[in-house]
Amino acid sequence: MKNRIRTIFQGVGGAALIVVVAQALSKGTGFFREVLFAGEYGVGRDFEFYLIAFTIPGILNSVLFYQAQNYFVPIYNEKKQKSIEEAHTFFTSSLVFFTLLVSLLAFFFYLLSAPIAGFFIPGLSEGDQHKVSTLFNMALLTLPLNGLISVTSAWLVAEFRFKVTYLSQIWTNLVIIFFVFFFGHALGTMAIVTGYIIGNLFQLFHLASGGRKIYPKGLKFRFSLKGGVSWLIFLNTLFVEVSGQFFIFIDRMFYSNTEAGGIAALNYSIIIFMLPVTIFTTALGSALLPDFSANIAKGDMEEANNKFSRAIEIIFLLFIPATLIYVLAGDELIGLLYQRGKFNAASTAMTAETLVYYSLSLPLYAVFAVGLKYAYSLKGSGALVAISVAGLIMKYLFSLLLSPSMHQNGLALASSITYSIQSLMCLWFIVRNSGFKVEKRLLGNGLQFILWPGVILAVSLLLISQFNLTSLILPAGFILVYPLILHLTKNSVYGEITSRFTGPR
């Protein structure tokens, strides 16, 4: 039994599985947190004030986590090939550098809190402006903590300690849930920010405890900015991560073009849209990033390309059905998950509409999320900067064009179009620089992953129309029937996934 469990968690697939399990627990608690938000705050003005106030801190915290991984892991692996001591000097230098940088940013934004509140929501009363500014200033306290959390997490990922990294995220969600459940009525949305700060402290302690066990004994804490920070790569990866998160900022810029509750609806729908991405694609990307960089450092491009091809196959297997579920059963899914308390039927309808427009890009966005990791390993940070600049321009222009008539739906569609184009641009870079080609296996499996969900969709729609059934029969069909079809047709991708648990077929 122990050997079977050990086999399950070996290699890249095992690493990805560890991240999937940890992310499922983390994102599961995070999703429950959002359901609690929906019932406690709905899509009301106070919750939108919180979303506005947390825009910049939230973007920076997310940027920090992925920036640290994308920047840190490939360089750390290169330095580790030369010297353990050099690699750990890079780690400690990055830890100090990231934390000081975000602390300075936090102080800078603190000085500008009132103008920032007025920028997002012009014409605020003095009381409302004070409320938004207070939430914003409290949220800024999370930045130094996340500087420490992000670099420590990246180091643990580079050392293949995925479980420690991703399980630590549960602490923040649990503490926020505690504060909102017990103090949400008394403190309002201030309970969310308070829980976030205290939860970050718990998360940092968890990471430090996990890292202490693997830090080489006898190595001293050494700091060196001269050789410890690769500035060009740092700035390039920083821009790429900031631009990806900047879509939220652009949405907030068009607040006046949205309907009442539109920004909150975008928030709830993007959480559902991102749920499979953060669980499965993050698992693949996090597991593959150190592996990609190791393969490329050894000059083994064939192996790196094979891993990327398998990742695309897994994405198509999972995300084509997810897209159909979101588009055709999104309203009932959102009603089931969110509709309670202050989140009423009108809130469900508004959120479901935005989810449809986001979902149009789901498979390509998932490919883009993994493709970024491969492109970073190919030293493509400069090309990714160009792709990111193009993405920001497209997102702004499409939002400007679509939001006056489509309101929040136009903002969701603008994001969807931009994600799709960026994914194709990233794939073009990978093909040009790695020799990656679409193999017969990838093409054949891709066609199957379109064909079988299409069959299940057609049968589900027939049953819904003939017997007046709920549209939730569609996700039920994918959960029960889709794996059975893949098993009976002996699909190679499905077989590789299940064999990790059951052994070779």
Image (cartoon, rainbow, N blue to C red):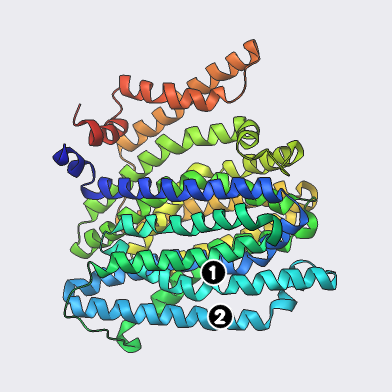
Q: Is residue 383 visible?
A: no
Residue 256 located left or right of residue 19: right
Residue 253 drawn at (x, y percent):
72, 64
Residue found 82% across the figure and 71% down from its top: 127
Disc 1 secondary structure class: helix
Q: CA distance from mark 2 to mark 1?
A: 10 Å
Taking 174 as reference, is 360 left or right?
right
Q: Residues within 10 Å of mark 1 (few under 14, many from 20)?
A: many
Instruction: Evaluate if marks 2 and 1 touch, with contact meaning CB atoms under 8 Å apart.
Output: yes
| Residue at image location 45% in from the left, 73% down from the top | 147
Q: Amino acid at mark 2?
A: Leu
Element carrying mark 2:
helix
* Residue annotated with mark 2: 105
* Amino acid at the residue labelled 1: Leu
In percent of width and height, residue 268 lies at 63, 48
Q: Which residue is nearer to you in this view: 481 or 403?
A: 481
Residue at horizontal 61 percent and vertical 47 percent from the top = 36
